[in-house]
Amino acid sequence: MEISSLSSKKVAFHTLGCRLNFSESGSIAQGFVERGYEVVEFGDQADVVFLNTCTVTDGADSACRNLIRKAQVSSPEAKIVVAGCYAQMESEKIKAMQGVDLILGTSEKYKVFDYLDSESAQEIHIDKSSEFWGAATTLADSRTRAFLKIQDGCNYVCSFCIIPFARGRSRTISVADAVAEAKGLAAQGFKEIVFTGVNIGEYEASSGERLTNLVKRIADIPEIKRLRLGSVEPNTVTRELLETLKATGKYQDHFHIPLQSGCDAILTSMRRKYTSAQYQDLLAQVRAIFPAAAFGADVIVGYPGETEEQFLQTFNFLRTQPITHFHVFPFSKRKGTTAAKLESQIQSSVKKDRVRTLVMLGDAKLADFAANSVGGTTEVLFENEVDGFWEGYSSTFLRVKVRSDELLKNEIRRVRIEGHSQAARSTWLTGTVAL
């Protein structure tokens, strides 16, 4: 494939799901740029539309199908590529839709350029190997924080989860390769790295190398100023890891630790590897080392057989714990999972009510957390300017807005917090850049 023949072509991306997907889209976007493509906004006319999909819930599946239709409208002459987890699990459903040219599984998507010039009416390439494919945010992805993929797949057998079927068994990048990727990100100007994966706490078990060593090595890169972990399973967070993160001086005060339920009977049925008391103890342990830490959590409501009393146990657990960033999902039956076969499936209307209740609780807790930040200062990595305000994120992963005549993109500045606002399920801080 000659670059010159592609010099006038455009590619549009749309990514659904987790930070891992975003890191992978960044790497694939860079591959298009290196082949002469211009990356344009999804919805603009393009020669190739690349949809990196998710299948964690029914809603994600529905969103994927809607995106395919939108791509057909915005770019009727484009080659439409549907890739990732939904493509891996439901290739036949996608095949039945009009206008899709390529269907690529979770690893095959990296080989998109091998298939792109094919004249076949439609091709399906679903993964058959367990190879690890590295990925990281690139400048082509137009982001300020860089997502660095260090792990993929999962060896757990949680009853509700389709991801092990979609992404396979756990596998990792080597420490040496991760450091090389991080140095490349630093050379591109990125100042913050977020480690991503399906189950990054299993890094050592899968690689034989220490996650703490990887953290230390990347923290030693002078240009990298901030570090974060993506979602990390509670049973994999050790005191050694926490102390290592603290010792870097670069780790931010935010931990995303999936909960799924505050009811031990539900956690047991889900095949989770902890109890609610152990989860509570972990939050206290984190706070002992990171006193200002904010916590995010995934929660599933309407799991088969979940009674009103069991839901209230989850509600009260979330109410009393220092969790402020809620990610609430209604239970979705995923084909092939144990939970999909359980009796006592919960009605959709009940699940919606429970989601709404927890979302309201989460919004209130996040607003209180933001209000408690007023009057203090925080460092912010600014990402972009929107409607006259520069926006970025604090150490605790609160969005911060300031007015400034300075060009603040990709700058880290200390901000005096003067107020907070909340609208449309969004909370943010306002302030001024400290001199």
Image (cartoon, rainbow, N blue to C red):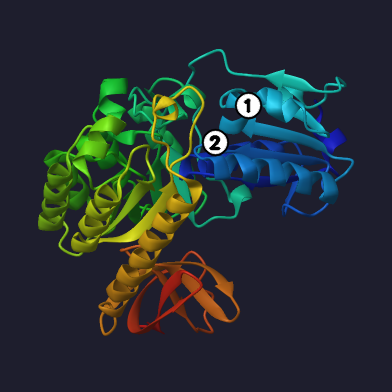
Which comes sooner in the sequence, label 1 or label 2? 2
Q: Which residue is mark 1?
A: 90
In the image, residue 134 lies at what x, y percent?
Answer: 49, 30
- Say whether residue 397 is visible: yes
Picture quarter with the C terminus: bottom left
- Say which quarter of the image contains residue 412: bottom left
In the image, residue 367 lies at what x, y percent?
Answer: 34, 74
Which of the numbered marks, if any, corresponds to residue 118? none
**At x 21% / y 55%, what residue is drawn?**
317
Q: In whole angstroms, how far apart are the C-alphas of marks 1 and 2? A: 9 Å
Vertical order, 142 against 424 (above or below): above
Q: Is residue 395 left or right of residue 291?
A: right
Vertical order, 336 against 362 (above or below): above
In the image, residue 144 lies at what x, y percent?
Answer: 50, 57
**What amino acid type is highlighted by mark number 1?**
Glu
Label 1–label 2 contact, CB within 8 A: yes
Within 10 Å of the Cα at label 1, are there few (<14), some (14-19), or many (20+) other Cα atoms? some
Which of the numbered marks, if any, corresponds to residue 55? 2
